[in-house]
Image (cartoon, rainbow, N blue to C red):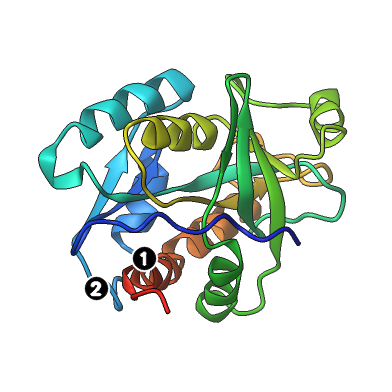
Amino acid sequence: MTENPAAPRPSENPRLLVACALGIENLALRTGGRAGARAPVTVLRTGMGPRAAERAMTRALGDAALRDAAVVATGFCAGLAPGMHPGDLVVAEETRDAHGRTPCVGTELLVEELVRAVPGRTVHTGPLTGSDHVVRGHERGDLLATGAIAVDMESAATLRTAAAAGERPVAAVRVVVDAPEHELVRIGTVRGGLSAFRVLRAVLPAFFEWHRSLLLPRR
């Protein structure tokens, strides 16, 4: 696996900003475990779609308290690769959209911490691509052919906007809610959606450990 770029050094005691789009994602994160937080944490609901994510992140990072915040984009996603299942985790090595690519920081550490936080769940790593609509049918194969392993509507816009607002560590972690063999029509109404919800509730401790590692002095 390609090494991640060195994490930019944040300012002293920086916040952690965790961004999601949907109300159900926000509920999962707010009711999940918060043990291990070493600095103030803000959970931001951006709204659905890349434009909403851009607007919400621009507003949030304009706040002096969040100006230097490390950013994690999270929530649900569609898996693209055969063999993926609802409840699997995706850790992005980079996010992509029509505007370019944003490299992520600390991918290997996030994988290690997610394995501890959600034992028994498969963690996939690779490019996470963005879309401006819900991906169905043949579109999955088209996106898979680009090298992406999963798709969602907000991560790429969230991280691109965060990086443009100032040097900071960014990452994206998504929970697969549907996949080629397990297409989901409505979240929360079938077992796959409920499984993904339970996994998302458990991921915050991994984010806290990722964030803590950014505060450690370089050797």
Task: Tell me the CA gap for discs 2 and 1.
Answer: 8 Å
The quarter of the picture where residue 162 lies is top left
Circle 1 crowding by C-alpha within 10 Å: few under 14, some 14–19, many from 20: many
Q: Is residue 209 above or below residue 17?
A: below
Report whether 11 appears left or right of 200. Answer: left
Which residue is more in the foreground, 176 or 19? 19
Residue contact at pointers 2 and 1, CB within 8 angstroms: yes
Write down the residue under mark 1: 211
What is the x, y in percent for residue 126?
72, 51
> Quadrant where the C terminus lies?
bottom left
Q: Which mark is residue 38?
A: 2
Report whether 192 appears left or right of 114. Answer: right
> Quadrant where the N terminus lies?
bottom right
Q: Which mark is residue 159?
A: none
Which residue is more in the foreground, 151 or 208? 208
Which is more N-terminal, label 1 or label 2?
A: 2
Circle 2 crowding by C-alpha within 10 Å: few under 14, some 14–19, many from 20: some
The quarter of the picture where residue 36 lies is bottom left
Amino acid carrying label 1: it is: His
What is the x, y in percent for residue 138?
86, 25
User: Of all residues shown, which one is farthest toward the left?
Assistant: 64
Residue at 45%, 58% in the rendered image: 7
